Image: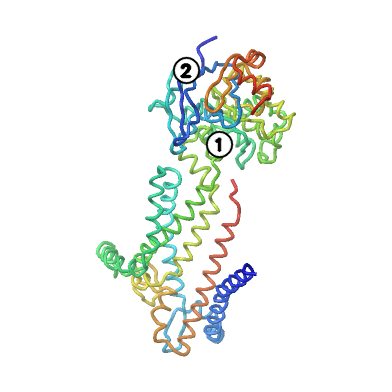
Amino acid sequence: MKEKLIEAVLLGLALTAILSLFVITAFILQAGLPLLISYGPWRFLTGLTWAPTEGEFGILPMLVGSLWVTVGALLFGVPLGLAVAIFAAEYAPSWAAVAMRPAIQLLAGIPSVIYGFIGLKILVPLIRDNLGGPGLSVLAGSLVLAVMILPNVIAISEDAIRAVPQTYRDGALALGATHWQTIWRVVLPAARSGIVAAIVLSMGRAVGETMAVIMLVGNSLRLPISPLDPATTLTSNIGLEMGYASGAHRQALFATGIVLFVLIMALNSLASLFRRRPASA
Amino acid sequence: MDRPKFEIRDLSYYYGSNRALHRVSLEIPANAITVLFGPAGGGKTTLLRLLNRLNDLVPGTRLEGRILLDGKDIYSPDVDVPALRRRVGMVFALPLPLPMSILENVTYGPRLSGLKNSKRLLEIAEKALRGAALWDEVRDRLHEPALSLSGGQQQRLCLARVLALEPEVILLDEPTSGLDPISTAKVEESLKALKKNYTIVIVPHSVQQAARLADVAAFLLMGELVEYGPGPRLFTRPQDKRTEDYITGRFG
C-alpha cells in the first residue's frame, strides 16, 4: 500500500518534469510562430537587417555570429579537451587522474558571468593590443567558450576512452605498437562515437551560452566576417533586447528562440544517436 | 640443451597489496613448448604478461626479481619495450582481429614498424599464414574482412599476425579456450610445427591440453611455482602431492 503511494508520487513528480518541457515548447511556439509565419521564415533566417523599430527582423548576422563563435570554441576547446582526456585516461598516474576530476568539474561550476568578466578584463585588451580590432570580438567569445566547454569535452571523452576494452590495447601493444600508436590507431577509433557525442554536446552548450557571450562579442548587428569583428549571437540578442521589447519585436525574439530551440534539439538528438551506437573497432 | 631463452629469477609481483606471484624461479628453454598450468588465479596469465612487459601500463603494480631474455634483464631501464614486444609476441584468449582485411591484419605489425613495400608485406603475410596453418584456407580471400572468418580461423589469424613480426618467442594465453575441438587440434598442430623455430610459452585451457603440448611444464598454485620439469615426466610422475591432486582432478 505504502509502496504504491510512493510509486504514484514519484510518477507524478517525473511527469511534472517532462510536462515543463511541453509547456516551454508550447509557450515559445505560441509566442514566436505568428511572426515567423507572417514575416516569412526564409526572410527571417536570411535577412541581413535587424531593425525592430522599422519592422525588419533578419537574423542572419546572429546566425552567423553563433556559428562563428561555436566553431571557434570547438576549434580551441576540442583539441585541448581531448588532450586532457587522453592524458587523464592513458598517461596520468591514478592519483593525478583522481585529483584532476574535481578540478575539472569545478571549472563547470564557475558562473558564466565570471568567465565573461575575466575574458573582458584579460582577453579583450590582449586581443585589441596584439591583433587589432575592437577586442570585443568573435575570437574573444570563442576563446572563453572554449574554456567553458572543456569540462564537457573532457568528461565525456575520458569516459569513452576508458570504456575501450583493455584487450584492444593489449592486442596492439603485443604487436609492438608504442603506447601512442596504440592510442592513435586503436583506442581513439574505438572511442570515436563517444568523442563525437562529446563534441556535439559541447556544440549545444556553446550555441546556448548567453551571459559570457554578451560580455565579450561586442554585440554588433553587422555580419561578422573576420574573427576579430564584433558580432551578435542568437542568444546574446535575446538576452539584450527581451527586457524592453514589445509587440512584433517581442515576437521576433521568441521566433529567434524557436530557431535556437530547434538547433539545440537537433544537436542533442545527434549526440544521443552517436552515444547509443556501440563502440565499433 | 643450450642456455635457456628466459631465466626467471626469484620473481614476485604485486597488484597493489595483492600478491600475484611469489618468488618464482623458472627456466624456459628455447625451441620447445613450455606450459604454464594450474587453477585460476594461480598467476599463469600474470607471469605470461610479464614476459613481454604487457603489464607495464597497469597502475599500482610492483615487481621484484629479474626476468632475463638471452641473459639480458628485460626490465632494465634501457630496454626498448615495443622492440621487446616484437621479439616476444603474444596471442590472447579471445581472437581479436582488427576491423580490416585479412591481409591488413597479418601485416599490421610490420606496417606499424614502418614497412611499406607491398610485395615484401605479401611475402611476410604468406609465410606467417602458412606458419599458422591458415594459408590454404584464405589464400583466395586475403582482401575480405577478417571478421568474416570463423572463430578458429580468427585465432590462427591472430597467431599469424604475431608470426609476421618474426618474433623469437610466442606467448599464448589460453588460445583455444573459445574454439571447437577440431580448430583446437589445428592450432595445436601449428604450435608443434612452430617450436622448431620458436620458443613457445602457453597457458593451456585444460590439463589435457597441457599434457598434449608440454615439453616443459610448470605448475603454478596461488602465485607459487609448485614444481616444473619435462612434461612427460611431470604428468606421469608428479613429485608434489598438490600437482598430483590437480592433474588427477581432485581439485581445481
* B42 with respect to B176 (left or right): left
Q: Name the residue rendered at 52%, 44% in the picture.
A: A187
Work out whether A39 lies above or below A101.
Answer: below
Q: Residue furthest top?
A: B1
- Which is more toward the observer, B62 or A241? B62
On the image, the x and y values in percent for residue A126 come to 26, 63
Number of other residues with Cα within 10 Å of mark 2, as a class: few under 14, some 14 to 19, many 20 or more: few
Q: Residue A171, labelled with which disc?
A: 1
Q: Quadrant of residue A25?
A: bottom right
Quadrant housing the C terminus of chain A = top right
The image's colour scheme reads rainbow
- Tag 2 secondary structure: loop
Q: Do the residues under discs 1 and 2 have CB atoms within 8 angstroms?
A: no
Question: What residue sits right under mark 2 in the picture?
Answer: B70
Quadrant housing the N terminus of chain A = bottom right
On the image, the x and y values in percent for residue A103 come to 37, 55
Work out whether B45 lies above or below A60.
Answer: above
Q: Amino acid at mark 2?
A: Asp
Q: Chain of mark 2?
A: B
Q: Amino acid at mark 1?
A: Gly
Q: Chain of mark 1?
A: A
- Which is more toward the observer, A49 or B170? B170
Q: Quadrant of residue A132?
A: bottom left
Work out whether A237 lies above or below A74.
Answer: below
Q: Residue B105, labelled with which disc?
A: none
Q: Residue furthest right?
A: B182
Q: Name the residue rendered at 47%, 17% in the picture.
A: B70
